[in-house]
Image (cartoon, helix red, strand yellow):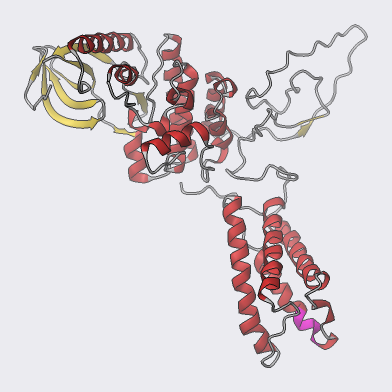
């Protein structure tokens, strides 16, 4: 069907203007002549090369899925009004939404604020819960299928989502229609659809919204599919409190993903800006002689555990003397940790920025003198006593420059920056600072053999990086790109 503006569909719906187009069809602004209201008319494009039998089967499936979607009544799901056939192709008549899509908003504004993304995710999840309870799996959830109109967050293309699978089965080429960046690994592998697949797509959609870009990239369609199935998502930089949930939703194994209820609890908390539970001492109740403590049934190995209140006992144990946010196997769930933040020792300690700088300065200074004195090719410890105050000042400034920055970069990026920066800083000291202070001399107390210099600065840059990574308070708590 090649519909044009002004065409009358099903003897009732007149096409006014084309407002959208994608791989599965075109969307028109239309006018319902019977009820005198504006509607959206989805013109479904049939795959090429279908036989008459395949075409009939395709039409029946589209109509069946659209009618199933029409039974869903929820403000977060677009309303399907009618399904008609026009010139041998299916047409779905839907509620007209005048807002923008989440995909268009991301393209226009880039990364969205964490709290706003959590609000959108919670609204989407409530709509998905209703659909899943009715036995309907979306299968093509992505930013372009999420519409924003005022306070409403609306998922569209329910009833069209199954057509991607139908088309795959019917076309002779077996081409997949859909957006691999947002399709779950099991869906790309051809496994039966399940609600857990929609949860994966929800995580990928929210990742794209909070980061401003998809979690997976590939230069070709095949490379993108392989990345989704075999690789981990790109480490998020802006997800903040959403980072642990996004990682859990995009777990490769569907059995290890959180349930819809668990995910909704986290999203609602982040949307409200609720503070995470902090470690607070609680008293341990003393059992009476008649008390019987029955251990709770343990969670399955690898299962995702939702955050629990700080007063809740650990699963399967008595209440501890001090409770901490629970940790599931393989997932450190700390909703307020900045994305990419370390989860090593001391990550949860409270240290002021000044204290962190002081600790890092002492560490950098000690490391510099240890390298300059203990490695056999260096001789920093042989500096004459009359020059020692100046050398201490130079090494102190060098260490302070490494201790002051508090970036929120990914650790791998930060390591590279520290090493390259220290190489450049050393040559500035050697070629500019030392000659100016010591009347043209360029001796620094460190070997001038290129190999030795590289080893010295690799060790020092790595040490300064470890201090930044591991000393609590060394990374800024600002929220990136709101």
**In the rendered image, the vertical position of residue 130 relative to residue 243, given as above or below:** above
> With 193 as the anchor, is 281 left or right in this view?
right
- Tell me the quarter of the picture where residue 270 sits: top right
Q: Is residue 301 magenta?
A: no
Q: Residue at x 84, y 81 (%)?
A: 382
Residue 404 picture location, percent across and down: 65, 63
Magenta segment's dominant SS is helix
Residue 385 visible from this viewpoint? yes
In this picture, residue 385 sits left or right of residue 159? right
Question: Which residue occupies the extreme right position in the image?
Answer: 289
Foreground residue among 220 and 101: 220
- Using the image as rendered, state which of residue 64 and residue 262 is in the foreground: 64
| Left or right of residue 32, residue 442 in this image | right
Task: Say which residue appears at 45% left-offset and 15% top-offset.
Answer: 192
Does the magenta segment cover residue 388?
yes
Q: Could one spot residue 43 in this view of the protein? A: no
Q: Position of residue 132 (x, y in %)?
A: 44, 13
Q: Position of residue 363 (x, y in %)?
A: 76, 62
Q: Quadrant of residue 442?
A: bottom right
Magenta region, residue range: 387-391
Q: Nearer the viewer, residue 89 or 451?
A: 451
Between residue 174 and residue 212, name the one nearer to us: 174
Residue at image point 57% right, 50% down: 410
Q: Position of residue 15 (x, y in %)?
A: 11, 23
Residue most toward the top? 290
**On the rendered image, what quadrant is the N terminus found in?**
top left
The single residue placed furthest to the front in the displayed view is 172
């Amino acid at each position: 069907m090649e519909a044009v503006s002004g065409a009358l569909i099903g003897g009732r719906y007149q096409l006014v203007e084309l407002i959208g187009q994608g791989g599965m069809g075109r969307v028109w602004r239309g006018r319902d002549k019977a009820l005198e209201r504006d509607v959206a008319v989805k013109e479904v494009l049939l795959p090429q090369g279908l036989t008459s039998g395949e075409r009939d089967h395709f039409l029946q499936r589209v109509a069946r899925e659209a009618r199933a979607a029409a039974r869903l009544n929820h403000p977060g799901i677009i309303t399907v009004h009618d399904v008609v056939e026009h010139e041998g192709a299916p047409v779905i008549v839907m509620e007209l939404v005048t807002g923008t899509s989440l995909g268009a908003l991301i393209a226009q504004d880039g990364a969205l604020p964490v709290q706003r993304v959590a609000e959108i995710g919670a609204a989407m999840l409530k709509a998905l819960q209703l659909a899943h309870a009715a036995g309907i799996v979306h299968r093509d959830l992505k930013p372009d299928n999420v519409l924003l109109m005022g306070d409403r967050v609306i998922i569209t293309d329910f009833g069209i989502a199954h057509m991607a699978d139908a088309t795959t089965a019917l076309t002779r080429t077996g081409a997949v229609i859909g957006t691999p960046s947002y399709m779950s690994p099991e869906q790309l592998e051809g496994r039966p659809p399940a609600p857990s697949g929609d949860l994966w797509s929800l995580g990928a959609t929210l990742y794209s919204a909070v980061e401003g870009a998809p979690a997976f990239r590939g230069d070709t369609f095949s490379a993108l599919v392989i990345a989704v199935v075999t690789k981990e998502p790109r480490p998020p930089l802006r997800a903040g409190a959403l980072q642990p949930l996004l990682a859990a939703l995009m777990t490769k194994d569907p059995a290890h993903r959180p349930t819809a209820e668990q995910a909704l609890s986290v999203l609602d908390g982040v949307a409200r800006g609720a503070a995470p539970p902090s470690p607070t001492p609680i008293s341990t109740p003393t059992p009476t002689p008649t008390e019987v403590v029955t251990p709770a049934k343990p969670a399955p190995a690898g299962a995702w555990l939702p955050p629990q209140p700080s007063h809740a006992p650990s699963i399967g144990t008595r209440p501890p003397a001090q409770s901490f946010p629970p940790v599931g196997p393989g997932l450190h769930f700390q909703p307020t940790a900045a994305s990419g933040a370390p989860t090593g020792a001391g990550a949860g300690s409270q240290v002021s920025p000044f204290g962190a700088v002081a600790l890092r300065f002492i560490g950098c200074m000690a490391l510099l003198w240890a390298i300059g004195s203990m490695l056999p090719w260096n001789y920093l410890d042989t500096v004459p006593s009359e020059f020692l105050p100046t050398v201490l000042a130079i090494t102190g400034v060098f260490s302070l420059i490494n201790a002051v920055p508090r970036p929120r970069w990914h650790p791998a990026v930060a390591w590279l920056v520290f090493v390259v920066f220290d190489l450049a800083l050393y040559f500035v000291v050697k070629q500019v600072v030392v000659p100016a202070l010591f009347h043209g001399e360029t001796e620094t107390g460190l070997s001038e053999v290129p190999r030795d210099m590289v080893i010295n600065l690799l060790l020092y840059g790595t040490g300064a990086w470890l201090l930044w990574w591991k000393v609590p308070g060394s990374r800024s708590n600002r929220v990136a790109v709101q």
